């Protein structure tokens, strides 16, 4: 039994014991195209969530020949900012436009980049207000799932950069996703954020009858000089979530924020850096878990 399934089972038992009925009903699995949807989610900010989503998507396209759509669900728009040197076009369709449409479809929001095989959605400062509007919609938790049906046919992989909170957009992303990757640095606060997100996945399993498969926990911003603290946090993770951490870890590397300032991927700005090697290794590990 998976960690998430176990949590969900315990929640269902608690519901049965207390007589409290969930506010949501289970629904069918999303319509499956060939594309796989991967949510990159973290409840704690500052753990490299967007950096991970950007470079995982780029490496899957560059190194593994996949057609990849990177969807920015955070109103800060850091995905487009991080890759602005690779984008030469704009779209009149935003993510919020697509989600609020009577027939949600994210294909119209996809922008080609100069990285072969990689498309992204543009920055969307209206996502917060759109989230408030979506709250009154019937089936509001499933809108992104519906909006990705056509994209699943067009792309091999769809990477969702989730907001750093548990709002409606994050719930939409997790319900639409086949897999979830959780970045966390080696700190106690980050580990508490992982615990909170795991409880959320268990709640989804209990209330909706499904949750994404937990692909793994990714240790980010690892200062490899701080071996004692790192070992302490790794032991705590192993006790809670044995077998879930990725073999790959993302080390502290000044080339990564430098590449972001240039609006380039690390593979273009500093291809020989440790950051480029780490994210190439992560993409290879993810590819092996999902596509091999």
Image (cartoon, rainbow, N blue to C red):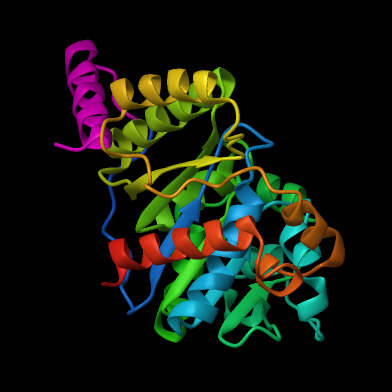
* Residue in the picture at 53% in, 36% down: 184
Q: Nearer the viewer, residue 180 or 65?
A: 65
Point 24% across, 20% down: residue: 15
Residue 256, percent across and down? Answer: 72, 55
Query: In the displayed structure, does residue 132 sit left or right of residue 136?
Result: right
Task: In the displayed orientation, state which residue is furthest to the right.
Answer: 261
Asked if the magenta segment contains residue 273, the reply would be: no
Q: Residue lying at the far left in this picture: please name it.
A: 1
Q: Is residue 158 above or below residue 234?
A: below
Count of number-bearing discs: 0
Q: Where the C terminus falls, by quadrant?
A: bottom left
Report which quarter residue 122 is drawn in: bottom right
Q: Quadrant of the N terminus?
A: top left
- Residue 69's x, y, as percent? 55, 74
Q: Most extreme residue toward the front, as rendered?
A: 225
Q: Main secondary structure of the magenta part?
A: helix
Residue 219 horizontal side relative to residue 261, left or right = left
Locate residue 71: give its quadrant.
bottom right
In the rendered image, the vertical position of residue 81 relative to residue 268, given as above or below: above
Residue 227 horizontal/vertical position (percent): 52, 25
**Residue 205 visible in the displayed image:** yes
Highlighted range, magenta: 1-22
Vertical arrangement, residue 79 with respect to residue 211, above or below: below
> Looking at the image, which residue is at 38% across and 61% down?
286
- Locate residue 127 relative to residue 288 in the image: left or right: right
Q: Nearer the viewer, residue 80 or 184?
A: 184
Any part of residue 104 in sight: no
Question: Residue sitting at 57 percent across and 23 percent down?
Answer: 187
In the rendering, at what x and y percent does residue 220 appear? Answer: 56, 41
Q: Which one is nearer the viewer's eye here, 95 or 113?
A: 113
């Amino acid at each position: 039994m998976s960690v998430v399934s176990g949590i969900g089972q315990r929640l269902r038992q608690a519901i049965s014991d207390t007589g409290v009925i969930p506010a949501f009903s289970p629904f069918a699995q999303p319509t499956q195209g060939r594309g796989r949807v991967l949510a990159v989610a973290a409840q704690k900010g500052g753990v490299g969530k967007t950096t991970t989503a950007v470079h995982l998507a780029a490496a899957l396209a560059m190194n593994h020949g996949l057609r990849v759509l990177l969807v920015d669900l955070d109103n800060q728009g850091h995905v487009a900012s991080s890759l602005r040197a690779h984008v030469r076009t704009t779209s009149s369709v935003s993510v919020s436009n697509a989600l609020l449409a009577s027939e949600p479809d994210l294909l119209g929001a996809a922008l080609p980049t100069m990285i072969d095989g990689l498309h992204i959605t543009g920055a969307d400062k209206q996502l917060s207000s759109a989230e408030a509007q979506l709250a009154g919609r019937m089936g509001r938790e499933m809108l992104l799932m519906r909006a990705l049906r056509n994209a699943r046919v067009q792309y091999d992989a769809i990477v969702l950069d989730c907001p750093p909170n548990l709002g409606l957009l994050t719930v939409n992303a997790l319900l639409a996703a086949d897999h979830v990757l959780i970045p966390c640095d080696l700190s106690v606060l980050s580990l508490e954020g992982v615990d909170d997100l795991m409880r959320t996945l268990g709640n989804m399993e209990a209330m909706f009858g499904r949750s994404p498969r937990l692909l793994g926990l990714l240790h980010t911003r690892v200062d490899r000089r701080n071996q004692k603290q790192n070992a302490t946090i790794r032991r705590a993770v192993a006790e809670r979530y044995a077998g879930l951490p990725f073999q790959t870890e993302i080390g502290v590397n000044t080339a990564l924020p430098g590449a972001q300032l240039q609006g380039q991927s690390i593979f273009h700005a500093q291809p020989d850096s440790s950051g480029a090697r780490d994210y190439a290794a992560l993409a290879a590990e993810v590819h092996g878990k999902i596509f091999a």
